[in-house]
Image (spheres, grey):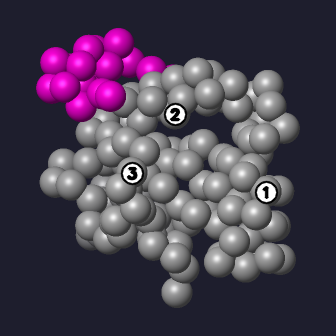
Amino acid sequence: MPHNWVDSTGAPVLVPPEGAVGFVYLITRTDTGRKYIGKKLLKFARTKVLKGKKKRFQIDSDWLTYYGSNDTLQAEVKELGEDLFKREILHFCFSKSECNYMESKLILTMGALLSEDFYNRWVSMRITKTHVLSALKKNTFN
């Protein structure tokens, strides 16, 4: 069983808040301090043909066992073991745009692309202004 995700206080996170669609996280290799900033959706959309009609449905993602999408980070987790890595949820998001915005914001403000202290190699943004403004009105941004 992988080590739990933790919140900013260090408390384990096993159940996301009601209405959350994803979260932005920080994975830290504890012996070197090297970090990875990413986002993870809580559900995946799937399509199935039932009685000749396409039906869309959602399934739970692999978020409980997830260790990022970076190849170098994944290889190190596999080689060194999960004990060497801390997984912290920085921000729960209530829309995909909010997830994209918060991940991009943190990558840029923390200088993740400019430092070898981070595994991050790129940032991609697809953000809808209406979703970001909606999140601001609901006060879900930090």
Q: CA distance from mark 3 to mark 2?
A: 16 Å
Q: Are marks 3 and 2 in contact (CB under 8 Å)?
A: no
* Element under disc 2: helix
Mark 3 against mark 2, which lies toward the viewer? 3
The residue beneath circle 2 is 103
Q: Which residues are magenta?
A: 124-142
Q: Secondary structure at mark 3?
A: loop
Check disc 3 and report the residue beneath it: 8
Q: Which residue in the structure is indicated by mark 1? A: 32
Q: Is residue 137 magenta?
A: yes
Question: Residue at the spot x=62%, y=27% of the render?
Answer: 110
Position of 27 relative to 96 (above/below): below
At label 3, the amino acid type is Ser
Note whether 135 is above or below 119 in the view shown.
Answer: above
Q: Residue 32 appears at what percent x and percent y? A: 79, 57
Give the amino acid at mark 1.
Thr
Do we see residue 68 in this rendering?
A: no
The quadrant of the image that shows the C terminus is top left
Badge 2 amino acid: Glu
Residue at 39% across / 51% down in the picture? Answer: 8
State which tag comes first along the sequence, 2 or 1.
1
Closer to the camera, 108 or 123? 108
Callout in the foreground (2, 1)? 1
Disc 2 to disc 1, C-alpha distance: 22 Å
Category of crowding for the residue at label 1, using alpha-carbon neighbours closer than 10 angstroms: few (below 14), some (14–19), many (at least 20) = few
Residue at 35%, 12% in the rendered image: 129
